[in-house]
Image (cartoon, grey):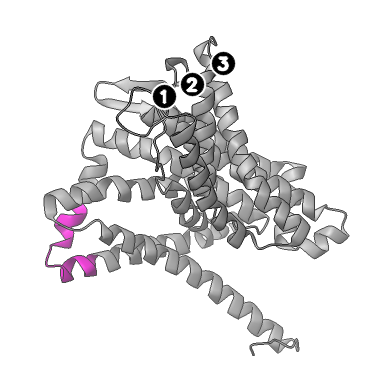
Amino acid sequence: MDKVKKLINDIKTPLLSIFFSFLVGATLIIFSGKNPIEAYAALFRGAFGSPAALSQTLNKSISLIFTGLAVSIAYQCKSLNIGGEGQLVFGAFGASLAGIFIKGLPAVIHIIVVLAVGFAFGAIWALIPAILKIKKDVNTVISTIMMNYVSFSVVSFMINTFFKASKSDFVTMEQVLDTARLPYIQFSTFRINSGLVLAIIAAIVLYIFLNKTVSGYEINAVGLNPVSSNISGINYKKNVLISLLISGGLAGLAGATDLMGSMGKLYDGYNPGYGFDGIPIALLAKGNPIVIIFTSLLFSVLRVGSITMQTSVGVSRTIVDAMQGVIILFIAAEYIIVLVVEAIKKKKAGDKLWFL
């Protein structure tokens, strides 16, 4: 019974956030002079209305799952990683290098190598904010978001100078080798990138890691109370470093799987926005890696379905951006309410608070 109550409590806020986001979206659609029922019908038709549409929705969710997981593990250690987009781009760059220049490997081995390099490049890009955090206690929100723009510039410079494809009218790198491409699972027009399997496995592994291992327990303990955990012998700095490196690596995998599954070659200006979407995806799931699979699917539905909503009904895709903003607003509101309630309890207990 306690587990059921906890489950209901965990999903209550996410469901309310989604409900009110659709309600606000409907209001905005009405003000724009369109029918919200027709608009939402088009949204879901664009996401699920055909095998091809469903394939696109599921394939789009792959990178979103990885970036959601990336935010989740960093947040478990109370280090909010806003740099997922930069780590994703850097991971895609590393995967592209491995996919182009490492030759002569069987497809299975080459895919594993490229994924490992993508993970490593994402982790390397997260290493700088991690060091700043454990050495100088620099806020990870500030350091990671600044590293995004450094990543975009560095990768753009590398593509334009050293790795530009010789026979291309556009600024891109060379196509990765066929042995580095992720295979598809196909039934007629239903075509799923096998990266989806990898993303689901990653979510399961991360769930087990956080809930069933000593290292996962330590990361959660540091996140709950860094002072008490440090007194108990849990190394605060080590766990912050580990969580941020894994976070960056998972974001790097988002870029690697996007490159290996859909693009095939990295282009200048690659910046899909999955890293930023990972933040509300993880917070909406309350950091639960399994639930992140489903919240990622929700955001994928909004991304893919909004195109049909715009083309067939004439409703702007910015409505979807507003809906995502409402979801974030409700998530933030819940955390603010919790903080205020805890503050009031402390005030009643006689503790002095700076704002009460």
Task: Determine the image quadrant of residue 56.
Answer: top left
**Between marks 3 and 1 in the image, the one whose residue lies nearer the viewer:** 1
Q: Residue at x 64, y 88 (%)?
A: 355
Q: Does dot 2 land on a helix, a strand or a loop?
A: helix
Residue 214 lies, with reference to residue 32, above or below; the image says above
What range of the chain is rendered magenta? 26-41
Q: Amino acid at mark 3?
A: Ile
The residue tagged 1 is 174
Quadrant of the frame with the C terminus: bottom right
Left or right of 117 on screen, residue 312:
left
The answer to which of marks 3 and 1 sits earlier in the sequence is 3
Q: Say few, some or many: other residues with alpha carbon within 10 Å of mark 2 (under 14 / 14 to 19 / 20 or more).
A: some
Q: Amino acid at mark 2?
A: Ile
Quadrant of the frame with the N terminus: bottom right
Q: Does the rendering let one see residue 199? A: no
In three-dimensional space, the C-alpha distance between marks 3 and 1, rounded to whole angstroms, equals 20 Å
In reply to whether residue 35 is colored magenta, the answer given is: yes
The answer to which of marks 1 and 2 sits earlier in the sequence is 2
Residue 172 lies, in percent from the top left, at 39, 32
The residue tagged 2 is 100
Left or right of 237 on screen, residue 328:
left
The residue tagged 3 is 109
Q: Residue at x 37, y 39 (%)?
A: 60
Give the main secondary structure, helix, strand or loop, of the magenta stretch: helix
Left or right of 317 on screen, residue 246:
right
Q: Amino acid at mark 1?
A: Glu
